[in-house]
Amino acid sequence: MNIILKMSTACNGTCVYCSAYKEKPQHLSLQVAGRALGLAAEYLAADRREHVHIILHGGEPLLRSRRYYEAFNRLIDERLGSLRPRLSVAMQSNLTLLTEPKAHSIRPILTRPIGTSYDIYPDVREIRGKRSLDEAWYRAMGVARSTGLETGLVYVVHSQTVRDTEKVWTFFRNHPLVRSVRFNPLYEEGLGKCGEAQRLGITAEQWGDFLIRGWRMFERDGFRAAFAPFTELLNAHVMRRPDQMSCSHKGECFDTFIGVDPDGAIYNCGRWSDTQEFSFGTVFDSGREDLLRSPARLGLSRRGKLLAEGDCADCQWWTYCHGGCPNDAYLEHGTVEARTKWCEGYLAFFEECLRPLGEPVPREEVA
Ligand code: SF4
Ligand code: SF4
């Protein structure tokens, strides 16, 4: 089970496409955090083979103080006890608020790398205050390195990236501080659906174009770059493991993800908490069994069958896609019972880059 914890919906960043932007930001109290950790303990206790993976998310989670994280660490011990070894914890952050003392307070909590967001275009992402994003990010990457915190990079693909795919790829491939990158398409939520962000939005065709040109760079490089989704697509197709792809390709996140907001509301994941739709309940009134019976969760669980027999019935690439992320479908169509707008881009990529390497993994080969 994956649990996305919104540590704060406030942020020191000024990304023009911010999906999590809130007029009145809130912080996750230790009381709500304790309830969410209690839920994690329930999942772990229910099945000895279960692992829970928590992502400390935001907003910006590093806005929370050292003292908060020290208390949070004690809370994990208190709520999980001997179950803690089956809990892993990562963080998603712009990293710019990382100081040495804060690094020492989060280090005992984190068991996985911090996914840090960054962009090479200064008019897309910036931070408040006197420092530029570049200055603050490079300083923080130095702190992460000197305090033994691992980092990966999350990059939002927008219209400027698509124009400069090879330049962006080469920048990160040769960057001495960057070991891995996950490229995600910009999606239109929060500030991302209005104003300045409109010039940055991309179409399915542009996403397909980015994937195809990125794949060519990946090939030229001997498939060595740890750049997702390229690594996952290679593994899915060549190693025949589409079941190891990320959530938006597997069609099962209603069963494997939840997101918890600072007010305790539970959603399918952090994206649904940004959208504020289909709440499963709250940490105050819902345990694991209640979540399994939640009408919102059951509604989302029906999507796979509907698409497999409907819009995607004839698609040979179903096992690599499953109709895409239900939140993307909802943002585009107002319903999850539709394939996402990225379909056309993926199909172009699958046919041009994967088909020459072999036939797709058929539906009957994946449980
Ligand atoms: S709604 Fe989308 S982003 Fe959220 S867990 Fe499901 S596939 Fe992933
Ligand atoms: S590529 Fe398109 S048709 Fe195929 S499974 Fe994905 S959304 Fe459905």
Image: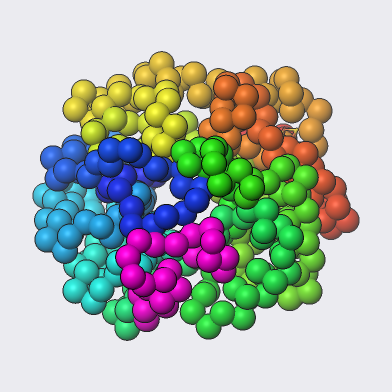
Q: In this view, does 30 lie above or below 137?
A: above
Find the magenta span and give its range.
117-142
Q: Is residue 293 visible?
A: yes
Could you tell whether 231 is left or right of 63 in the image?
right
Give 304 or 48, whichever is nearer the viewer. Answer: 304
Q: Can residue 241 be seen in this view?
A: no
Query: Which residue occupies 77% across, 45% down?
Result: 205
Number of numbered markers: 0
Query: Which residue occupies 29% across, 69% down?
Result: 98
Which residue is situated farthest in the top direction here? 295
Could you tell whether 45 is left or right of 238 in the image?
left
Residue 56 lies, in percent from the top left, at 32, 52
Query: Which residue occupies 21% across, 56% down?
Result: 64
Residue 189 lies, in percent from the top left, at 50, 38
Q: Is residue 290 above or below residue 14?
A: above
Give 168 or 224, whichever is nearer the viewer. Answer: 168
Image quarter where the C terminus lies is: top right
Residue 265 lies, in percent from the top left, at 29, 30
Assess whether residue 135 is covered by the magenta stretch: yes
Could you tell whether 82 is left or right of 89 in the image?
left
Image quarter where the N terminus lies is: top left
Residue 48 lies, in percent from the top left, at 31, 44
Give 9 or 322, whichever is nearer the viewer. Answer: 9
Q: Quarter of the image holding residue 222?
A: bottom right
Q: Quarter of the image holding residue 212?
A: bottom right
Query: Which residue occupies 52% across, 74% down?
Result: 179
Assess whether residue 257 is covered by the magenta stretch: no
Which residue is situated farthest in the right direction here? 356
